[in-house]
Amino acid sequence: GKQLSNASKWHSHGRGISAETLREELKLQIDDLDADPAKADAVRAYHALLEDYMMRRGQMGVVHYASNYMPFHTHEQ
């Protein structure tokens, strides 16, 4: 986390860091969803469901992890 938050290293404010860079420089293990179409479809289906749920609740962003759903930004803010 500390390495990722070093904006002067990544110059990434407002843009992403490639998976290749994360693998090479931080030695992160990242699943390649393009290599597993079934997994990619499951992630897309989950994302569509979560996006619909957030919209119905007026939430623009959430953190969702095992047994917990925490909104961090709503339309009202």
Image (cartoon, rainbow, N blue to C red):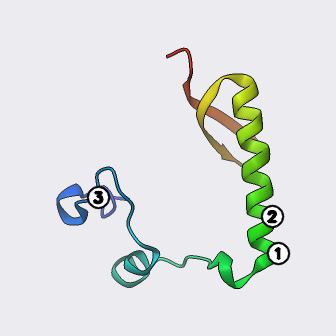
Q: Residues within 10 Å of mark 3 (few under 14, many from 20)?
A: few
Q: Secondary structure at mark 1?
A: helix
Name the residue tied to disc 3: 12
Q: Is residue 60 above or below residue 76?
A: below
Q: What SS does tag 3 mark?
A: loop
Label annotation for residue 20: none
The N terminus is located in which quarter?
Answer: bottom left
Amino acid tagged 3: Ser
Q: Which residue is mark 1?
A: 38
Q: Seen in the image, is 25 located left or right of residue 56?
A: left
Amino acid bearing label 1: Ala
Give the alpha-carbon distance from disc 1 to disc 3, as whole Å. 31 Å
Task: Quickly name the residue at label 2.
Answer: 42
| Residue 31 place in picture, x, y as percent | 62, 77
Amino acid under disc 2: Ala
Residue 15 in the image: x percent, y percent? Answer: 35, 56
Which residue is rendered at x = 43% and y = 81% of the image? Answer: 20
